[in-house]
Amino acid sequence: MIGQKAPLFTLKNSAKESVSLSDYAGKTVIIAFYPGAFTGVCDKEMCALQENMAKLNAASAAVIGISVDSPWANAEFAKKYNLEFELLSDLDREVVTAYDAKFTGLGGLDGYVSANRVIIIIDKAGTIQHRWVAENPGVEPDYDAIVSLAASL
């Protein structure tokens, strides 16, 4: 996957508007797949990304959070934590599949498919430059490394 063109997608944001990866053409994009809103570690992850927004904005990097949650759940999640980046709903699980970011059995729910905790960094030309996958959904990424790598692209 690293070195390949990022699969294009269009998903609904928390306002139920369509947002496409192509909307971010010419920017470095950090896609943060997360298992579920209001689930502790996901809260910490999205807040950590929000805390780094000034540095990421200075590097012309955009953050997109993607989960299988509904637009309504993502809207409340964004509101609670004052998130300034898009949270997109992958209700059909097509994007988590395309990016090999699926996790089955979250919270002990057999057969439930959510996003795993996966970070994808895409350069300004639309090529995947970095992919990090959590060993399990309770593991957080190295936020400083994400910011440094995004700033270097």
Image: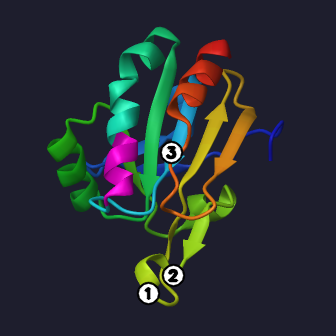
Quadrant of the rendered image containing residue 51:
top left
Q: Amino acid at mark 2?
A: Gly
Residue 62, compared with residue 152, is above or below; it is below
Q: Are marks 2 and 3 in contact (CB under 8 Å)?
A: no
> Tag 3's secondary structure?
strand
Number of marks: 3
Query: Looking at the image, which residue is at 35% across and 64% down?
Result: 69
> Tag 2's secondary structure?
loop
Q: Gap between marks 2 and 1, in whole Å?
A: 5 Å
Label 1 sits on residue: 109
Give percent across and percent down for residue 29: 56, 30
Of labels 2 and 3, earlier in sequence is 3
Residue 66, compared with residue 4, is above or below; it is below
Which part of the image, by quadrant, shows the C terminus? top right
Give percent across and percent down for residue 132: 66, 46
Q: Gap between marks 3 and 1, in whole Å?
A: 22 Å
Label 3 sits on residue: 32
Q: Is residue 43 magenta?
A: yes
Q: Which residues are magenta?
A: 40-46
Q: Are marks 3 and 1 in contact (CB under 8 Å)?
A: no
Q: Are marks 2 and 1 in contact (CB under 8 Å)?
A: yes
Q: Amino acid at mark 3?
A: Ala
Of labels 3 and 1, earlier in sequence is 3
**Can you name the residue that lies furthest to the top here?**
58
Quadrant of the rendered image containing residue 47:
top left
Query: Looking at the image, which residue is at 46% across and 33% down?
Result: 63
> Tag 1's secondary structure?
loop
**Can you name the residue that lies furthest to the bottom here?**
110
Give percent across and percent down for residue 119: 59, 44
Drawn side of residue 153 relative to residue 93, left or right: right
Disc sitting over residue 105 in the figure: 2
Q: Gap between marks 2 and 3, in whole Å?
A: 19 Å
